[in-house]
Amino acid sequence: MNHASTMRNTRITPDDIKSHGLSDAEYAKILEVLGGREPNLVELGIFSVMWSEHCSYKSSKKWLKTLPTTAPWVICGPGENAGVIDIGEGLAAIFKMESHNHPSFIEPYQGAATGVGGILRDVFTMGARPIANMNALRFGDPKHPKTRHLVAGVVAGIGGYGNCVGVPTVGGEVNFHASYNGNILVNAMTVGLAAKDKIFYSAAAGAGNPVVYVGSKTGRDGIHGATMASAEFDANSEDKRPTVQVGDPFTEKLLIEACMELMATDAIQSIQDMGAAGLTSSSFEMASKGGMGVELNMEAVPCREEGMTPYEMMLSESQERMLIILKPGKEGIARKIFEKWELDFAVIGHLTDTGRMVLKLRGAIVCDLPIDPLAQASPEYDRPWVATAKQPILAASQVKNLPWREALRILMGCPDIASRRWVWEQYDHMVMADTAQRPGGDAAVVRIHRSNRALAMTTDCTPRYVKADPFEGGKQAVAETWRNLTAVGARPLAITDNLNFGNPQKPEIMGQIVEAIKGIGAACIALDYPVISGNVSLYNETDGIPIMPTPAIGGVGILDKLDQMTTIAFKAEGEAVLLLGQKDDAGWLGQSLYLREVCGEEKGAPPPVDLAHERKVGDFVRGLIHDRKITACHDLSDGGLLVALAEMALGGNIGAALENVAGHAVLFGEDQGRYLVTVKAIDASAVQSEAQKIGVPVRRIGITGGLDLTLGGESASLHDMRQLHEGWFPAYMANAT
Amino acid sequence: MLKAKVHITLKSGVLDPQGKAVEHALIGLGFPGVGGVRQGKYIEVDLPEQRDKSKAKSQVEDMCKALLANTVIENYNVEVVD
Amino acid sequence: MLKAKVHITLKSGVLDPQGKAVEHALIGLGFPGVGGVRQGKYIEVDLPEQRDKSKAKSQVEDMCKALLANTVIENYNVEVVD
Amino acid sequence: MKAAVIVFPGSNCDRDIALALEQSTGTPTTMVWHQDTDFPELDLIVVPGGFSYGDYLRCGAMAAHSPVMREVKRRVEKGTRVLAVCNGFQIVTEAGLLPGVLMRNRGLKYVCKDVHVRVEDSQSAFTAKYNIGDVLRIPIGHAEGNYFADHETLQMLEAEGRVAFRYCALDGEVTDDANPNGSQRNIAGIFNKSRTVLGMMPHPERLADAKLGGNDGRALFDALVETLA
Ligand SMILES: Nc1ncnc2c1ncn2[C@@H]1O[C@H](COP(=O)(O)OP(=O)(O)O)[C@@H](O)[C@H]1O
Ligand SMILES: [Mg+2]
């Protein structure tokens, strides 16, 4: 065929290469793949998105491969749209977390909304009905002039989308830190349920099979979104506006229902959502995975605007679209379903056995690329990295000792600990009528429909630990999710990760990535808790200032009996409060919130995570829960012992009198692998001796009752604590625009 | 007293799910010949102390930039009347 | 092709929480001299096949009654342009 | 009792309320797609919550004008009971089956939380198992639940005892603090004149199972089954 006459009228310039985010070396590789022929603009665009950081994972691939991804219960690990685990009784849980950081900074409402839409599609494309959403959010300093506006927009966007599609948003996390001033993080997670033998994959098969486009029409939205998500921000980024995508949750809801209806038939050979890089990555990846070729007729693509070019159609990131390979002869039944739901349905091409991606516009070839060579040649970098320098261990004596009541008051009302009620009351966390544990506890619990079993889920990461020691911080993030699942009584099963970092071309940032991944991997192995899906977001920097390294972890576990679930709230007066897992009396204040919020310092080594200890204590706690020995349970994290205790007291509106604990290091230290539990007074000594028998440190630290927390002759009223804890967020957001 | 009439509309090319849904519904209700429908906002701002129309206009345009419009995806148009 | 510009505004006496909130926010942002603010909708309907302006107007008024406005609380105004 | 739930594009509490009904009736609930207008004789029609047509334009407006609602109106004239929850309440007011409108919450935000409502009537098929003055804990989830009607309408509703539920404090006192959305007179739910149509913003189906933390909503479904069986 004559490429010169049908495919191109202008030559690729160095500017084209640069504006597509490709390096000279990468362009040279493109020429190699094409056997010396220059690409045309459509082809260059396709290379640029397929080789972008976002789609190719070129900086992180080498290290991601080291993560443990298997277990007997893992049905499908990383590599598909989402990960799949077997949860028994013929069912599978499907989940993933994904970032929408850059779009959310540019337009917080739409950026966050479309982030939710995208992750939902990743999950239902595999045949799962989404049953819960979570969101892990990081914003800049509350005092930064943009923060309020961003918080308001992101939260409204997540709610606006999730509420309308009717999937409950049941949990997440919110942190504030100046390092996110110019680069907020919006990580959204979806958990879905499917029949174990009805999972849908994306590998295309069957030459001649129709390629079908369904959902919304294609507009000029987000063209270059994938390359933008892979580029560092600068002061002009706010001008990159035309690339903003608008979400349409109503259409997404129809798309979910239509896909579920089609999936119940036997019509689908393979299916994939059109995510970042839209039609390009979906068609390319489906063909590539199946070793097939694909031929598309661009004039058949449903378009929203007049005169769209193949380049625009291929690179558009319009939302709420899916690509389906149908089995032969199934077009009629599929079309009928999508017409019922008033969604676009178009056969836009077919599979071939040529191994090439051929795009035609009214018969003329506008793109002809070899699929396998392009995928094979996709860059993979072993970027240079340096390890983060270890920080000295801080002794308690080096840290100012404030009276506990004063310190507790500061912590309860500080931005990172204050109640997130303002956030989650804007999310419908009840729709689907299976929410058994709502936001505000350690993990959300969602009943498996029409059963007495439930899934528990949580997201966690403590970026200040990761920054100080990426390896320990990576371990900690995984361990904290495991602990949160354990604390509600669930058996942790697997995680998804969302690795948010700065520019990987800087060796110190690459070092954070490498060490955090190693830490995550170590924790996964020790806890039998594999990674089944994930997402990488790099270049989170503004004017050269990186975010704190933030590998957000989403953990999922199962409760075999819903009635074994525990919550953090104190249940009755006169119960014993036990501290489990406290190894010694040193108390770890390095990188603690006490140090940051009370003393105004961010320093020291973060608390180490002893994974064997973690597992022993956690398994013991879960056993107690299953034996119904425990009336309330809360793991210790940000703010340490007293903050956890205050949260339990506020949850039940019952106070406690404390003994056997003293000193800022023990009261506010953030040693890992610890839980606070309450047990009926008569059970206390039996539980204590059981713990001692297997070597789990246990200490009785008080008794529930009254409406105050008392310790060493001082007391703090729950009323006061509640005002501080509940007050900060609404007061802060009162003047949002 | 001056009054500003502000029209806020989506920039061209930005998806308008509301307009699209209204269009569908009108056709469903049997109205023939409905082409595209676009939905925007209409805001009236009273400026009781302002006498100068051109000042009023630029003031309300500032309001649009600061609050009334989301300039990432929306255009605004301000008209000042007595 | 004709196009109808439809303004939908709240009847007087009906509380307008959005307008009130915008008013507050504008004052909070330091805009002086903002009196009342009212927020309504602005809808454009394309009528590609219609040539007769007065027919177009009455047709779109029917759309307002049938769907676009809730006449319990809202007024509508239709203007037809080329 | 023969009950059906109408499903509009964008309805999302349809399955939830069908299941809550099933708990009380012991039989599967019929789902009626919004384009089907010839459904069988029924004792109860449910217009469920959600975001019919995305809540675009005005909540409930587009669904209110769909063919199925014309049929629902005919059935109401024949005496069929209609339970309209949340978006359903918005739909039936837009359709003229109940007076007034549900406007944007005064706080302008979507709110999902438990509220308390006081039962104001126990004479209807819906509320027969409650006593006047009972305080129920029940979730809301809406951005437009701010009930508004003109003065005469409100007077009429009060005079005819057609307010079904009012937002209240834990002790039953009707206070402004307990009003989550700015509704006039703290109205959370109203009846039509013959008490055969109930529209309410709170979701009884969301707390109809003790395993999910409460079942104050259950008695509403049980009452319907007992009265209409
Ligand atoms: N963005 C959010 N969306 C929904 N729920 C949230 C969000 N942020 C925090 N939460 C909820 O608030 C509670 C406290 O969060 P967090 O302090 O992160 O808990 P933990 O320390 O146990 O991980 C959790 O139940 C969490 O799910
Ligand atoms: Mg926790």
Image (cartoon, coloured by chain):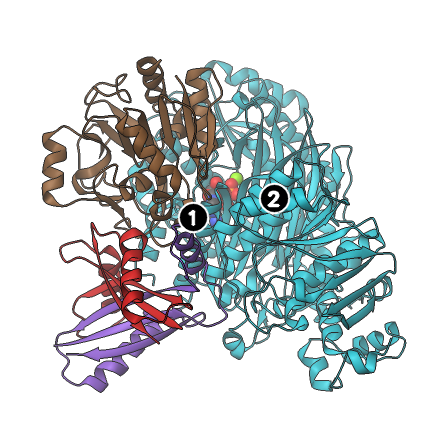
Chain colours: A cyan, B purple, C red, D brown
Say which residue appears at 35% left-offset and 54% top-offset.
D57
In this view, the residue in front, A302 or A146, is A302
Q: Is residue A573 left or right of residue A688?
A: left
The disc at residue A56 is: none
Q: Position of residue A258 (x, y in %)?
A: 58, 43
Say which residue appears at 58% left-offset and 17% top-offset.
A627
The chain to which mark 1 is attached is D
> Does residue D140 appear in this view?
no
Q: Is residue D79 left or right of residue B31?
A: left
In this view, the residue in front, A168 or A662, is A168
Q: Position of residue B55 (x, y in %)?
A: 22, 85
- Considering every residue shown, the one lying at the far right of the view is A35
Instruction: Find the distance from the CA under tag 2 to the CA under tag 1.
Output: 20 Å
User: Mark 1 sits on what residue?
Assistant: D53
Q: Is residue A266 left or right of residue A142?
A: right
> Does residue A180 appear in this view?
yes
Amino acid type assigned to the residue bearing label 2 in the image: Lys
Task: Determine contact: label 2, label 1, CB under 8 Å.
Answer: no
User: Mark 2 sits on what residue?
Assistant: A336
Q: Position of residue A177 (x, y in %)?
A: 49, 61
